[in-house]
Image (cartoon, rainbow, N blue to C red):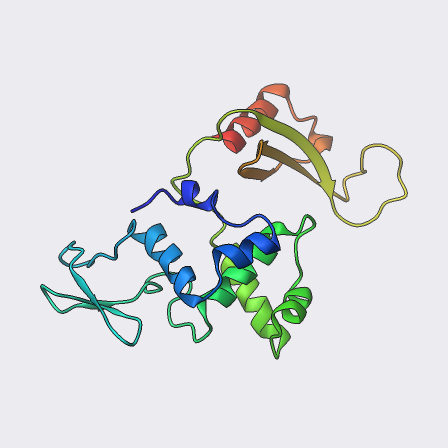
Amino acid sequence: MADPEAIWREFPKDLPEFGETFPDEASCRRFLINLRWGKKPRCSKCDTDELWALKSGRFECSSCGRQTSVTAGTPLHGTRKPVKMWFRAIWEMTTHKGGISAKDLQRIMGFGSYQTAWSWLHKLRSCAFFRDRTPLKGAVQLDDGYIGGRSQQVGRPNGTKALVLVAVEVHGRVRIEHSPDWRSKLPSPLRIGIWKILVR
């Protein structure tokens, strides 16, 4: 299996680059094959890369006859939409600085219903965390901020907003963690511990 974080770095950063990297459905499937298996698909039963490509888009093992697809066992399993549409949704979700709402995704993707856009975002957001993620590397920028409704109060919020800590690799990955309420007088060692969780 290829390193997902290394491949993620190759994901397009702007719309023109997206069009160049993924001009068609085949290019999206090649990207997924590389992400899952590293260049060539493999049989999950025999662990061989001797598979036949079928007209249906699936693969059949030449040894045991087991069939699989590039989306099998992934959040895209069973989807009737082109993989390129999913890639575009991923791009939209990850490049909007303030995030993207289901309503905006519905408009951009041309979905017929709000529910479809909401379910896509829910599915993609659930995949945004790597269990075996590697530590952030190189120069890492740290910051914090408050998320919540508007407040007329000057200075620190009165507890109506959530404190969020953020660590960002320069030109790389992002870690975000919700911090305990500032009113609890978060001790320095605990704050440092949260930063360590973020950058690992």
User: Toward the viewer: 22 or 6?
Assistant: 22
Residue 9: image x %, image y %?
A: 48, 42
Using residue 155 as the reference point, say whether residue 67 is left or right of it: left
Q: 87 or 148: nearer the eye?
A: 87
Q: Position of residue 27 (x, y in %)?
A: 41, 60
Give coordinates of residue 51: x percent, y percent.
Answer: 18, 63
In the displayed structure, does residue 4 sit left or right of residue 55?
A: right
Quarter of image, res 172:
top right
At horizontal 53% and vertical 33% (from top left) the residue drawn is 198
Give left or right: position of 135 versus 54.
right
Q: How many marks?
A: 0
In this rendering, is residue 41 above or below 8?
A: below
Residue shown at the point (50%, 60%) measured from the top left: 87
Residue visible at 29% across and 47% down?
1
Residue that sits furthest to the left in the current view? 63
Q: Residue furthest bottom?
A: 112
31 on left or right of 171 = left
Location of residue 85 in the rendering, given as x and y in whole percent from the top left corner: 51, 67
Which residue sits at x=63%, y=74%?
Answer: 114
